[in-house]
Image: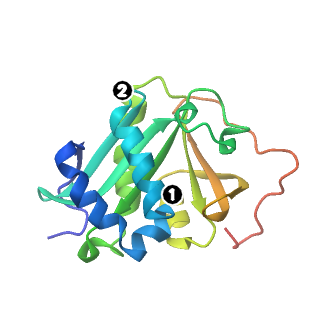
Amino acid sequence: MEPHAELRLRPATPEDRFRIRRWLAAPEVEAWWANAASAEAEITLAMASEAALARVIEQAGAPIGYAQAAEIGLWGQNASEGLASGTWDVSLFIGEGAHRGRGLEADVLGLLTDEVFSTTLAVACCAVVPVRNEAGVRAFEQAGYRWQRIWRDALSGPSWVMVKERPGQPPQRRQADQPPPAAGKR
């Protein structure tokens, strides 16, 4: 089967909690989404909120990961500084080891971002991606996200704030005190 074939998102349900908890225990997932305790709290909040989309990633009908999007005000963090009101934060991880490293993340981001733009009034989608997670940064770039600034996350350390505007929206500006990344160093 083609690595990206039959990829889809479905709403996460309470029955998915144990599977998600198992996935969060994997060190590879922690590289994408900080520590398991804070990730589980964030997922719980997203699953309970009408200002969020909580999704299970499926391939050929089998659950392989988790993705979510939430209006940035839901998190109440400083990472939203410099982002337009109405921006949604997106996050994901591939939980099943056999599906990691196959480049699925950019396709999942495309599906999730498309759903946000087609079902909400979001002006943009953003993500805080740890600098140490180069594969994550590349996936967001492949999905059309661009670097905006670096933010020091309390759990993940230095992280890129990456943004993708709703098609037809004027681009958000990089903060004046942040230089662009060095060529080849993104």
Image check: 126 left or right of 104? right
Q: Residue at x 65, y 61 (%)?
A: 159
Image quarter of the N terminus: bottom left
The amino acid type found where label 1 is placed reads: Phe
Q: Residue 109: percent from the left, percent from the top?
A: 40, 51
| Residue 31 against residue 58 in the figure, above or below | below
Whole-angstrom CA distance, mark 2 to mark 1, is: 21 Å
The circle drawn on residue 140 is: 1
Give the SS element for disc 2: helix
| Residue 58 against residue 79 in the figure, above or below | below
Q: Nearer the viewer, residue 82 or 60?
A: 82
> Badge 1: few (under 14), some or many (20 or more) residues near its Cα, within 10 Å?
many
Image check: 43 left or right of 128? left
| Residue 4 against residue 128 in the figure, above or below | below
Q: Residue at x 52, y 33 (%)?
A: 74
Instruction: Identify residue for label 2.
Output: 119
Residue projecting furthest to the right: 177
> Badge 2: few (under 14), some or many (20 or more) residues near its Cα, within 10 Å?
few
